[in-house]
Image: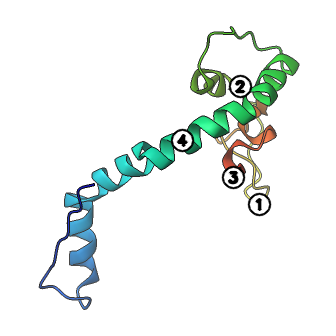
Amino acid sequence: MTRIEATTTAGTADQKALDDCYVQHAQAVDRFWQVSSPDAVAFAERRAKALLPALHSCLTEHGVDWADDESFSDLLSKGVVGSTGEPADDESGEVVVGSDGSQPQFDCAQEIGYPTWNG
């Protein structure tokens, strides 16, 4: 594994300079590594395998057509559909979809526990 180390003369007194440096030189690599490292890929595969049956059920329950050969990611993107046209309640904690602030009619990712799965 390659490890890149960097130092700065700004010290901790100039946090803005450190933050700007991180954004300019390391943030993209950091984000890529967080989703592309072997551990992250293995986790995503385990999660997809564990949640696929529940995702199939949720999509079917909500009348969404899906094919057996669709990827988990493609199915997951089908799992947030429409909006009610009602303004979101800011204190509800619900996922907000759409520029008009409306809530989804259904959100299979939330229903199957995708964001909080840690198996």
Circle 2 or circle 3, nearest the eye? 3
- Residue 65 drawn above or below residue 109: above
Q: Are marks 4 and 2 in contact (CB under 8 Å)?
A: no
Q: Which of the numbered marks, if any, corresponds to residue 81?
A: 2
The residue under label 3 is 118
- Residue 65 drawn above or below residue 32: above
- Whole-number angstrom distance, CA of label 1 to CA of label 3: 26 Å
Q: Are marks 2 and 1 in contact (CB under 8 Å)?
A: no
Precedes in sequence: disc 4 or disc 2: 4
Give coordinates of residue 31: x percent, y percent: 38, 51
Circle 3 or circle 4, nearest the eye? 4
Residue found at the very far bottom of the displayed protein = 13
The residue under label 1 is 91
Q: Which of the numbered marks, if any, corresponds to residue 55?
A: none
- Residue 63 drawn above or below residue 104: above
Q: Amino acid at mark 1?
A: Glu
- Whole-number angstrom distance, CA of label 1 to CA of label 4: 35 Å
Helix, strand or loop for disc 3: loop
